[in-house]
Amino acid sequence: MFTGLVIAVGDVEAVRDLGGGRLLTVGHRGGEFAGLSVGDSVAVSGVCLTAVAVQPASVSFEVAAETLSLTTLGGLQPGSRVNLELPLRASDRLGGHFVQGHADGCGEVIAAGGSDADYRLRIRHREPRLIVRKGSVAIDGVSLTVTSSSPGEACFEVMLIPHTRAVTTLGALRKGDAVNLEYDILAKYVGALVQDDGAPDGTRDGG
């Protein structure tokens, strides 16, 4: 479990094919990774991966073919930058929202820009029913608040403060870029339980 509060931005050092998957090696400069061990989980641009090799300044992950096809990780190359987060500990403050690291798919940036005080990203996506204004969403692993939602256009908007643009990869996003999206876990459970007519599962026939 993560919170969507990125602790470091890493640089992809190597990508190597492994059967149907790939071995991804990411370099980092954060002291927070000093205690990382093989088998630990790390969120890489919002995707939970297991460390299979740990070096003082890098960590390697085996990425399954399904993950490569459903997220932006399939397009990573040496030199790509990724957001990194370690799992939430029971004693940590929950500064963002509950993020599982299970990306629901990719969205597309359809607009990016504005002033330092009002910088916006507009994202096209496939599940407008799971996004609400003032709700939470994780974009490339970063916990953000939805500032507006346009279900009819299947898009939503978030605002990035200067700090978020400086310490994550989101400030470099441009129109046409793909991003990993994870919808709020509560929205996903409610969406699974409630049908289009508003009746919970099992109640349509008088149950």
Image: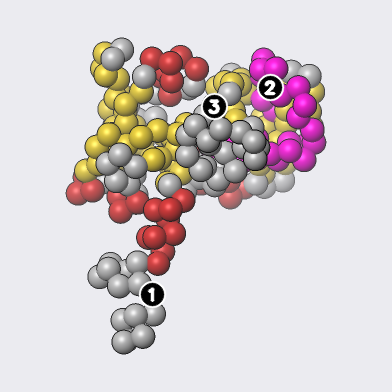
In percent of the image, x 43 and y 16: which residue is there?
163
Within-10-Å neighbours for mark 2: few <14, some 14–19, many 20+: few
**Do tag 2 and tag 1 residues touch (Cβ < 8 Å)?**
no
The answer to which quarter of the image holds residue 83 is: top right
**Relative vertical location of residue 202 with respect to residue 145 in this rendering, above or below:** below
- In this view, the residue in front, 35 or 64, is 35
SS at circle 3: loop
Q: Is residue 87 visible?
A: no
Mark 3 residue crowding within 10 angstroms, few (<14) / some (14–19) / many (20+):
many
Q: Is residue 12 magenta?
A: no
Residue identified by numbered label 3? 6
Mark 2–mark 1 distance (CA, rounded to whole Å): 44 Å
Residue 206, image quadrant: bottom left
Identify the residue under disc 1.
201
Counting from the top left corner in percent of width and height, residue 16 is at 70, 33
Q: CA distance from mark 1 to mark 3?
A: 37 Å
What amino acid is labelled 3 in the image?
Val
